[in-house]
Each structure stands twice: as C-alpha cells, then as structure tokens.
Image (cartoon, rainbow, N blue to C red):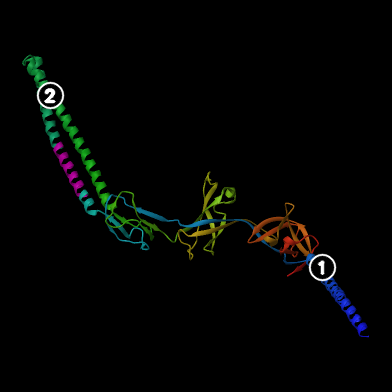
Amino acid sequence: MRNEITREIAECAKIAPVAILLLLLTLLGTGCGKGGKGEAQSAGAAVTMVSVRAEAATERNFERRLTVQGTIEAKVFANVAARVGGNLDALWVDEGDSVVAGQTRLFQIDPIALSNSVTAAEQSLKVAQAGLAVAVATCEKAEAEADKAKLDFSRFERLHKEGRVSDNEFETADTRNRQAAAGLAMAQAQILLQQSQIDQAAAALQIARKNLEDALAVAPITGVVSKRSAEPGEQMAVGKVVLAIVDPDSLEAAAFVPAQYYSDVIPGETTFRLSVDGREIGNCKVYYRSPTINPTLRTFEIKGRLEERAEGAVPGAMAELTMVFEQRKGVAIRSEAVLSRGGKPALFVVESGQARQREVTIGWQNDGLSEVLTGLAAGDVTVYEGQTLLRDGIAVDVR
C-alpha cells in the first residue's frame, strides 16, 4: 500500500512542472494578444489625425512698399574754420552751447599781430600818398623847364634862319628842348606810378583790415555747437575747422534706395513713414531725389524734411524710412502658412475636419502676412502650424 502511494506522488511531481509551464504560456499569449491590438489601434489613430493650428483668412489693406535704413541729418549746419592764420587767442563757446547768427562771438585769432598789420598798411598808404605829392611837384617843375626850353628853341630857330647864331648854338638849344620834353614825360609817368602805388597800398590796407575783422569769428547760423576741434593757444592755419554748429530745428531724413525704385520715387509727391529707435515720427514728403544713380552701388539718395522735432530725432540718429507706392485690399493669411509643393506655392485649408491642399498665387507681403490673389477666399480656415506634416485628405485636430 505504502509503495503505491509513493509511486503516485512521484508521477504527480513529474506532471506538475509541465502543467505550470503550459499555464504560464497561455496567460502570456493572452496578454500579448491584447497589448498588440491596443498598440495597433493607437498607431492607426496617430497616422490618421494630426494636431494643427489654423485660423480664418481675412481681408485687409496691402501695400507695395519699401523699407530702408537712413540717417537723421541737420539740413542747416556750419563748419566754422579759421579764416586767417595765427595763434588761437580766445575760444568763448563749448560743445552744447547755443549760438545766435551774427551775434554770438565764437573765437579770435592773434588780434594784436593783425592789428599791427593794419597800422603798417596805413603807414604804407601815407608814404605812397606823400610820394604822389612829390611826383606832382616834380612834374610841375619839369613842365616849367619844358616850356622854357621850348621858347628858347623857337628863338634860336628864328635866329638860326637869319644867320645870327651858329649851328652849334642852334643844336644846343634843340637838345635842351628835347631833354626838357623827356623830363616832363618822365615826371608825368612818375605821377602815374605813385598813383598805382597808392592804389596798391590802399588794397593792402583793405586786406589787413579784413584779416583783422576775420580774426574774430561770429556765429554764421543759429543753432547749437556740436563739436569743438581746437583749444586756445593752438596755431591755426587758414581753413582749419574750429567749431561745428547744427540747427536742431532743421532736420531731414536721408537714405539710399535701390536703383530699380528710381521711377517710383517722385519728389514733391512720394511720402515715407519715418521711425527712429522703433518710435513712429510721422510722415515726410520726399523733396530731393538724386539726379544720378551711383554706378557702383546702384543706389540713389533721397531726402525728406521733418515738419517738427520729435524725441530721439537728432542729427546722426539711425532712422527707418518706409515708402508706400501702391495700396489695395486683398485676402490675408499668415506668411508661414504658405508651402512650396512641386515648385509652386500651396497651403492647407480645413474642411469638415480634413486638410485640403490648395495651390495659390501669392501677391504682396506686409507685416508677416501674405496676400493671396487666387485659390483662397476670406473666411477659409488655413493651417499655419503643423502644415508640413499634412497630406491632402488627412484628418486634423485644430487646436
């Protein structure tokens, strides 16, 4: 009896591992089957639906415009230079000082030396005038001597004809007459010479006085001193700039424009929107268009006046000029919504929860928006984010 029980236990021990193994395999197979089906369903959902961002196309005004970088400049300015050479004795203004045209004294160059030059020129003129007086007196003396020699010659000529004087005496009288005439001519020429010397001395005096006047520089325009290029004690040469003055109330914006827009810019008609440091200043009218195009850069210069001063609009500031050549109303979408498919512009619209591809014609672009000329109407919902993952007919989830 005990032996039979022992055999049954041994047989069960052999069967148990096999049964356990079969049970585990069954459970594993069942679990894998369920998991595979779920993943397949999830993958299918991911392929058939794409999350996108979209918005409806709208109508707005578009502009054919050009934006260029330019500079704010002072239309009225002056570089005040030394008009005479010499030591810079005094400089009365500094950078930032306001000056008034014809009133504010700016600087003075070596007035003592130039004043002495005026005195010397005045004396030279007096000497020339005295020389003229001497020449006139000499001429009067020569004229009297010439008259006497002429009378003597006439008398000797008559006596010689009568045979009462010798040939030698007659020839001597003739010689004295001609010498006296030559002396008179020389005296008259001396008067002309002295008169010319007077004129020369007078001109030199005028120059000396003008140099003394130019030694004192007075403001040529009303404005503000923007730069000081010299200091008292420096030796000045004619033409060396000492001060720069600008009129902050006479401002203009200048810029260089590509040559292809030359015919679009019409002085007196074309306007541009001006902004400085991101701040809108207002509209300005183009008053100047360069008569030539730079053959190297292929650009031309334009200028427009600022009607009034604005914060930040100072000479030297960088400006942005936007010229508007044409305006029209059109269908607007975000520029990033436009794709290139087959070398042509295209986009996706959302219709009944599906993405539909459309070929479009793009016009002008302003402020991140593109004008759609054909292929789209206002109100059509266009995809602007996630469109690169789309194909025609795919389901979309608009967020």
Please state the extent of the stretch shown in magenta in the rendering. 118-135
Q: Which mark is residue 177?
A: 2
Asked whether residue 180 appears in the rendered view, the answer is yes
Between discs 1 and 2, the one toward the N terminus: 1
Residue marked by disc 1: 40
The answer to whether residue 245 is magenta is no
- The x, y position of residue 342, in whole percent, is 74, 52
Q: Nearer the viewer, residue 24 or 28?
A: 24
Q: Is residue 57 visible?
A: no
Q: Which residue sits furthest bottom?
A: 1
Tell me the quadrant of the picture where the C terminus can be found. bottom right
Which residue is painted at 92% across and 83% down in the image?
3
Q: CA distance from mark 1 to mark 2?
A: 146 Å
* Amino acid on which disc 2 is placed: Asn
Which type of secondary structure does the marked residue at label 2 adopt? Answer: helix
Residue found at x 39% / y 55%: 78
Q: Residue 225 is drawn in which quadrant?
A: bottom left
Residue 336 on image: x %, y %: 68, 61
Check contact, mark 1 vs mark 2: CB within 8 A. no
For the N terminus, the image quarter is: bottom right
The one of 228 and 270 positioned closer to us in this rendering = 228
- Of residue 22 and residue 262, the one placed in the foreground of this image is 22
**Residue 103 x, y percent position in the rendering:** 33, 60
Kindly identify the residue that appears in the image at 51 percent across and 48 percent down.
290
Mark 2, residues whose alpha carbon is within 10 Å: few (<14), some, or many (≥20)? many
Residue type, mark 1 in image: Ala
1 or 2: mark nearer the eye? 1
Looking at the image, is 7 positioned above or below residue 291?
below
- Foreground pick, 361 / 188: 361
Relative to 36, does residue 101 appear above or below in the rendering? above
